[in-house]
């Protein structure tokens, strides 16, 4: 094997390790017990809370940051695995992801509104839902094959189109991309 090929395999291995690390961190974060009194009601078990003002907050009542490190206390939290599809709130935007891409591949939200996304892996692959825009870097959902999870976050105040994708190496290239349109 030549050096160029070896370096390629090393880089691919590092990327896969990072993706797996994000998935594990998100999974571990979703199982941690809250440290304070909730200031509202989570839309799905493990997700961040929507307070009376309609803003997404953590367990201490502090508004979450969409640009925080995924799975940190400041970030929107993904739910525990959702076993029963009926447990997904009717108000959630429901997405599926597979090797063929996301379905639907776009959705619309109002600027600044609290948004709950439900993402389901409908194939045998691990997927990591994420946004390209760094202002939404904390909105990430790691999925095992066949798993459903949800995340609640505040939509950006800035109108526009925000690209989401599967952050597992090679998945974006095969078409696992979509657009959130903020009005």
Image (cartoon, rainbow, N blue to C red):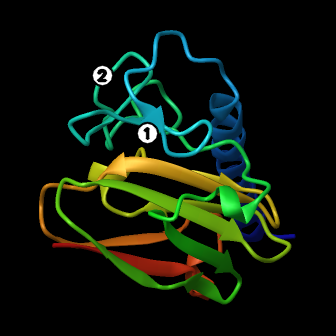
According to the image, label 1 marks what residue?
Answer: 76
Query: 173 or 43, which lies in front?
Result: 43
- Where is the C terminus found, in terms of image quarters? bottom left
In the rendered image, is residue 139 in sight? Answer: no
According to the image, label 2 marks what residue?
Answer: 62
- Compared to residue 31, the image places residue 43 above or below, namely below
Q: Residues within 10 Å of mark 2 (few under 14, many from 20)?
A: some
User: Is 37 placed left or right of 169 in the picture?
Assistant: left
User: Is 166 placed left or right of 180 in the picture?
Assistant: right
Instruction: Choose top left, top right, bottom left or bottom right for residue 69.
Output: top left
Q: Residues within 10 Å of mark 1 (few under 14, many from 20)?
A: many
In the rendered image, is residue 92 in sight? Answer: yes
Q: Earlier in the sequence, mark 2 or mark 1?
A: 2
Q: Position of residue 39 (x, y in %)?
A: 37, 21
- Compared to residue 159, the image places residue 49 above or below, namely above
Query: 112 or 40, which lies in front?
Result: 40
- Compared to residue 108, the image places residue 55 above or below, namely above
| Residue at 27% over, 50% down | 135
Query: 170 or 161, which lies in front?
Result: 161
Q: Position of residue 142 (x, y in %)?
A: 65, 53
């Amino acid at each position: 094997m030549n050096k160029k090929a070896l370096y390629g395999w090393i880089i691919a291995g590092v990327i896969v390790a990072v993706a797996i690390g994000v998935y594990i961190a998100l999974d571990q974060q979703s199982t941690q017990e809250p440290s304070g009194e909730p200031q509202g009601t989570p839309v799905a078990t493990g997700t961040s809370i929507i307070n009376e003002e309609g803003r997404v907050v953590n367990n201490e009542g502090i508004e979450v940051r969409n640009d925080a490190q995924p799975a940190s206390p400041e970030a929107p939290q993904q739910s525990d695995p959702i076993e029963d599809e009926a447990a997904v709130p009717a108000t959630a935007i429901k997405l599926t992801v597979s090797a063929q891409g996301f379905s639907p591949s776009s959705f619309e939200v109002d600027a600044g509104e609290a948004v709950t996304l439900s993402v389901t892996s409908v194939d045998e692959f691990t997927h990591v839902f994420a946004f390209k825009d760094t202002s939404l870097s904390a909105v990430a959902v790691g999925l095992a094959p066949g798993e459903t999870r949800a995340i609640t976050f505040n939509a950006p105040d800035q109108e526009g189109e925000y690209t989401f994708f599967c952050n597992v190496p090679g998945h974006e290239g095969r078409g696992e991309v979509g657009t959130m349109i903020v009005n």
